[in-house]
Image (cartoon, helix red, strand yellow):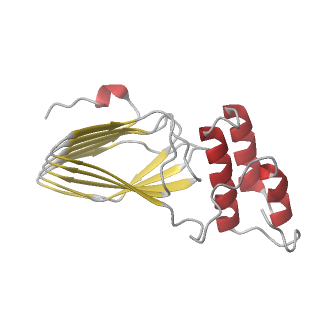
C-alpha cells in the first residue's frame, strides 16, 4: 500500500482493498486462518491509512489494477447443465449466479470473502439455484420470486460478514441456507 500521508483517516474503500489482499493471502496459502482472522480484525478497526500499512507489508498486492476497489464482479452460470462450485475460492464483491433450465450448487463455507459485505445476485429461470453460506454470516434477502420457490435463511450473528441476496426467480427454485439438510434437490 502506497501511503502519501499515514495520518490520513482510512476510508471504507481503503479497508476493503486491504481485506481483499489478505483474503487473497489466505486463498493462496500465504496466511493461516488464524492470521487472516487477526489481520481482518485489525483492518476493520484501523483508523488511519498508516494503521493499514503493516497489515499487508509481507503480502503481494495482487489486487492492484486500474479498476476501483469494490467493483470486482464475477459470474457463474448453469444453462441446460449442472454446475457445482465449492472449496477454497474468492468470490467477487458482487457475484451473479444464474441457473436457466439447469442446476447451480454453490458452497461458500470454505470460500474467502473479499470484504465484510458481499452481494450475491441469484437468478433462476426454470432452474435450481442452491447456495450454502458460512455459519457466521448475516444474510439479508432482497430478491423476488414469480411462480417459484424461494427459501432464504440466515439471520443475524454478531461478528459475521454481511451477505446481501438479490435477484429474481421465475418458474424456478432458489435456496440459501447454512444447513446441509436444507440442500435437498427435491421439488
Query: Residue 62's spot in the image, x, y percent?
Result: 65, 54
Q: 87 above or below 124?
A: above
Quarter of the figure that contains the C terminus: top left
Position of residue 113 in the picture relative to residue 18 (left or right):
left
Q: Name the residue: 80% across, 63% down.
A: 47
Q: Is residue 186 visible?
A: yes
Residue found 69% across the figure and 60% down from its top: 15
Left or right side of 174 for 110: right
* Residue 139, percent from left and from top: 44, 48
* Quarter of the rendering containing residue 75: bottom left
**135 to 67, vertically: above or below:** above
Question: Where is 185 relative to 115, above or below?
Answer: above
**What is the quadrant of the N terminus in the image?**
bottom right
Observer-nearest of 169 and 106: 106
Q: Nearer the viewer, residue 9 or 101?
A: 101
Q: Nearer the viewer, residue 60 or 12?
A: 60
Q: Quadrant of residue 34?
A: top right
In the rendered image, the vertical position of residue 93 relative to residue 37, given as above or below? below
Residue drawn at x 69%, y 39% is 37
- Residue drawn at the location 58% of the way across and 71% of the way down: 68
Amino acid at each position: 500500500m502506497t501511503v502519501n500521508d499515514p495520518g490520513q483517516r482510512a476510508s471504507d474503500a481503503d479497508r476493503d482493498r486491504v481485506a481483499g489482499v489478505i483474503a487473497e493471502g489466505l486463498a493462496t496459502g500465504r496466511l493461516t486462518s488464524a492470521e487472516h482472522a487477526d489481520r481482518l480484525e485489525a483492518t476493520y478497526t484501523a483508523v488511519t491509512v498508516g494503521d493499514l500499512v503493516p497489515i499487508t507489508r509481507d503480502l503481494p498486492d495482487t489486487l492492484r489494477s486500474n479498476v476501483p476497489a469494490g467493483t470486482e464482479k464475477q459470474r457463474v452460470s448453469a444453462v441446460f447443465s449442472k454446475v457445482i462450485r465449492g472449496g477454497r475460492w474468492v468470490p467477487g464483491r458482487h457475484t451473479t449466479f444464474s441457473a436457466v433450465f439447469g442446476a447451480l450448487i454453490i458452497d461458500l463455507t470454505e470460500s474467502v470473502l473479499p470484504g465484510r459485505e458481499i452481494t450475491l445476485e441469484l437468478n433462476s429461470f426454470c432452474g435450481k439455484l442452491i447456495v450454502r453460506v458460512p455459519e457466521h454470516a448475516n444474510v439479508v434477502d432482497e430478491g423476488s420470486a414469480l411462480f417459484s420457490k424461494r427459501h432464504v435463511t440466515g439471520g443475524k450473528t454478531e461478528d459475521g460478514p454481511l451477505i446481501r441476496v438479490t435477484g429474481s426467480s421465475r418458474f424456478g427454485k432458489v435456496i440459501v441456507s447454512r444447513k446441509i439438510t436444507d440442500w435437498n434437490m427435491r421439488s
